[in-house]
Amino acid sequence: MKPAPVGYVRPSSLEEACRALADDPEAKVLAGGQSLVPLLSMRLAAPSSLVDINALPGLAEVEVLDGTDRTDGGVRVGALVRHADLLAHDGAARAQPLLRMALSHVAHAPIRNRGTTVGSLVHADAAAEMPAVLALLGGSVEVLSTRGARTVAGADLVVGPLESSLAHDEIATSAWFPALAAGQGAGFAEISRRQGDYALCGVAALVRLVDGYVVEARAAYLAVDDTPTVVDLLPALADGTDGTDGAHLDAAADLALSALSPCGDIHATAQYRAHLARVLTIRVVREAVRHAGDRGEGSAT
């Protein structure tokens, strides 16, 4: 199929882009287009016009802050940063290894070369990797409109299937991913029918060790519920253990499943997704504990 007729606006400033969206409630922002263009081609989306932000300056940068000068460490990703560029950014990977872990699973190389990380976030697909990572890390998205700027917490970004909490006239200008703190470790895994396909289930985990014991453990689940779900696994692990023995990992998987509502579709049954969530929870928590141990307690990298 071919897209329905659509208008096209290519603003030269953020202010102009915001005005174009405010003036046309049916307009959509075009950045990488790797999610939007297929929807247009299948006529699952029919905006009145596209506001192409690719000519806007200052949105294609990755900024890594080291946590000095009273600032929090982390990675700020501009709205036009392509998945491939963030994946290849060594500074971003050192500050927050979970970015590279997750981005390596995003679609295929041609899509990563054009698709944007911030665009993936606001597309709000529960099967996408980056919204789950943002929610797990406690990150945020900066948005702008003619009414001003505001910050949206990662946990509040996705409110339903392909539905974000952004208003129609707001543009996401950047995303903030906090750095991995001392003693923390991360892990990520997903299962898909083929490499690059949408995940049937994916899990990202964040663990912190003190004196060899787990004092923080969370996991985020993608492609399980209608929205990314973050589960606190610490109650299953925080009793003087490093979290890697079978009994505690089984308990962590049970705790995760009690907080999830796996959905079934043409790709996988709810029961199969629950099974994958259990298996991946055990695998990824173990990986995160190992990663924390390898980084060393009190390590800055």
Image (tube, rainbow, N blue to C red):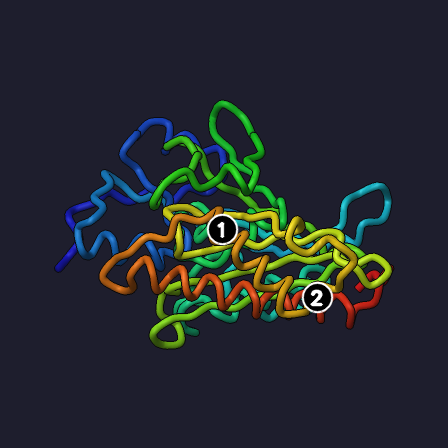
| Left or right relative to 160: residue 84 | right
Q: Is residue 22 above or below residue 139?
A: above
Residue 144 at x, y percent in the picture: 51, 33
Q: In which quarter of the image is residue 64?
A: bottom right
Picture layout, residue 212 above or below residue 152 = below
Residue 80 visible? The answer is no
Is residue 27 toward the left or the right of residue 16 in the image? left
Other residues around mark 1 within 10 Å, as few (<14) / some (14–19) / many (≥20): many
Type of the residue with mark 2: Val
Q: Is residue 132 visible?
A: yes
Residue placed at 56% from the left, 30% from the top?
A: 150
- Contact between labelled residues 2 and 1, with CB atoms less than 8 Å apart: no
Going by the image, does 191 lie left or right of 92?
A: left
The residue lying at 79 percent from left, 64 percent from top is 301
Callout 2 secondary element: helix
Which residue matches tag 1? Answer: 131
Which residue is at the front of the view, 26 or 153?
153
Place of residue 169 in the rendered image (x, y in percent of width and height, measured from the top left): 40, 31
Residue with the mark numbered 2: 289
User: Quick check: 111 left or right of 286?
Assistant: left
- Residue 37: horizontal and vertical position, in percent? 28, 56
